[in-house]
Image: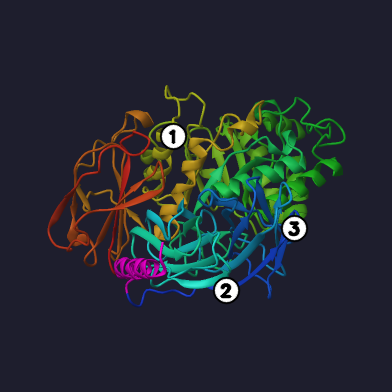
Amino acid sequence: MSRPYRIGLRRALSAALAAMALLATPASGAAKKLFVQKRDGQIGSGDGVSVKFAKATKPGNLIVAFVVWDNGDPVSVTDSSGNTYASAVGPTQAGGDSLFAEIFYARNIAGGADTVTASFETAIGGHAALYVHEYSGLGRMLPLDTAIAASGSGTLMDSNTLTTHSTSELLFVGAVSNGASVGQVTRGFKLRGRRRGELTAELVAPDVGSQRVTALQSGAAWALQVVAFTYVGDAPVSPRFPLGVGASGRYLVDQADAPFLMTGDSPQALMVNLSESQAAAFFANRRRRGFNSVWINLLCSTYTGGRPDGSTYDGILPFNNGFDLSQPNESYFARVDAMLRLAAQNGLLVLLDPAETGSFLSVLTSNGVDTARGYGRYLGTRYRGFDNILWMSGNDFQDYTNAESDAAVQAVARGIQDTDAAHIHTVELNLVSSLEDPSWEPLIQLNATYTYDAVFANVLEDYNRPEGLPTFMVESNYEFELAAANEPTPEILRRQAYWSLLSGATGQFYGNHYTWQFISGWQKHLDTPGSTQMGYVPRLFGPRAWYDLVPDQSHSVVTAGYGDFGNDSPGGSDYLTAGRTPEGSLVIAYLPTVRTITVDMTELSGAATASWYDPSRGAFARIAGSPFANTGSRDFTPPGRNRDGDGDWLLVLEAPH
């Protein structure tokens, strides 16, 4: 190709890129300052490249690492602060060349002086590079929204279209070419790292929807990756335990007065069936999945997957003389200490049951009220400095109507409160509200709802109680288990979660047949559809004022299409739950089945942006014609079945505050 022709082609490409850039330019005034710092480094040989940040990183921030290397073998990323790195997209090969690229990220980082290292399975042939970037204000539980990768051999690099699902997302670009340069990235992107044939850039996209990135490169092969991370702004870095009750009395808050949406898992037998290293891996997995709470039984026997003598997997007994509660075994409780610390390191609240009543009710009654209270004082004294605890008595506590049994269980709670005034208490009775036993009311600050039926009926009943305690759904159908004649599919689990939160709950707990007791094969049942989709719950509610939502019990917001109210099995109910903030800036409605509903738009504070949220994928789809005026009524119909092939969707209406 002659030089004049190459110049003409480049000019034509530049013009095309300029036109595409105009289409992709963000709205004015939308940029948010998320970038903190960046560094990069490269090597010509060896099996690893390390880069040290110039200044200490901040806890809770996000690190994005872009790695380029010249063989196809795997690469992993670690750092000196112990943060966990996940692959966002890739690896992607540059055309037919030997160059590869991959973007990694570490969320909710520990903070401090930090060196990031990319380690290669086999030594590189001649070139590798590592670009590291720190950002603030991005999601701490599930920051990754979507990603795309492309490669080719032409001059024009084109990512193709990816779709973002929330506003102000960070679009991070990593590009590599086997030529001398990469440039002319889509207008609006800020260059962050640039070396010969390599580039990183970013843009804060104010609008939801299609995004596309292009650039020009001077070589014969290229790879381009784009990753979208969700924006959460100035939300708290992580929960500051212990928890308290919020101003309205309807939800929990941490010590920074930040509302705490309980998103829980139920590894009840963890204390006796896992080693510390296994527990650390489990907690890290649950943190990555979006959980912020776990239910653990401090003592565990056959009723909850343990051994008859209450021992750990490696033979440590909880007490020195059978089940004499006055003689705790220091080795066992040191193990408890370690497990609680591991949970805290992962930002997890522990619902800690001091003596679950399935196996230990008879132990409590045989020891007597005084000894049981002394055991409670021991626990209160030992654990009052462990901030990430919420005490939960009971567990299928069927015998609460028996005065002797109730007194023995309450004695432990009273003993804890004798020496520990810092932590909230609740109790799980058997398939009823905590407040069904009025004698517990002075002892608890949080109500637990427990049912295998359609949970909205029970949660709403508890929401409407005059006692006015915050309520959470502690237990319902577990994944991979049969209950109430329904096998809990992901759809059933989603119904339980969204019904609960839109009926006024401050959170809800998931359970898994394999991991509540840690039976054989549990490691292969961690990243299940149900556990994944529970992580999409806080993705929707977390950035929004969920704690101000008032259940639409009178159907003044959703005026038609709300289905039949009935305490049926969860799979047999079509009832819609909806919530509205008092000033009308937010309405969320959960439709368990596809049908048309009618919304009184005058309940919104202004013109409302409308979206459908697919709870099976955690993805938004903006409704055509939105925003809609806050006048009259409007019908809404979901766009067919969701990505799981089920009928459930959430309608999200957001108006100016």
Q: Which residue is mark 3?
A: 45
In this picture, which residue range is highlighted in magenta?
1-27
Residue 16 in the magenta stretch? The answer is yes
Q: Is residue 250 left or right of residue 626?
A: right
List the single residue furthest toward the left: 632
* Pointer 2 with pointer 3, Cβ within 8 A: no
Q: Is residue 235 above or below residue 87?
A: below
Q: Is residue 447 above or below residue 55?
A: above
Which quadrant of the figure contains the C terminus? Answer: bottom left
First in sequence: mark 2 vs mark 3: 2
Does the image show residue 437?
no
| Residue type at the position of mark 2 | Val
User: What's the distance in space between the residues labelled 3 and 1, CA to CA?
Assistant: 48 Å
List the single residue furthest toward the top: 485
| Residue type at the position of mark 3 | Ser
What residue is at 57 percent from the left and 65 percent from the top? Answer: 237
Q: Which-is-in-front pick, marks 2 and 1?
A: 2
Display coloring: rainbow
- In which quadrant of the rendered view does residue 527 lie? top right
218 vs 306, nearest the viewer:
218
Which of the numbered marks, if any, corresponds to residue 40?
Answer: none
Q: Which residue is mark 1?
A: 490
User: What's the distance in space between the residues labelled 2 and 3, CA to CA?
Assistant: 30 Å
Q: Which residue is mark 2?
A: 36
* Pointer 2 with pointer 1, Cβ within 8 A: no
Pointer 1: residues within 10 angstroms few (<14), some, or many (20+)? many
| Residue type at the position of mark 1 | Pro
First in sequence: mark 2 vs mark 1: 2
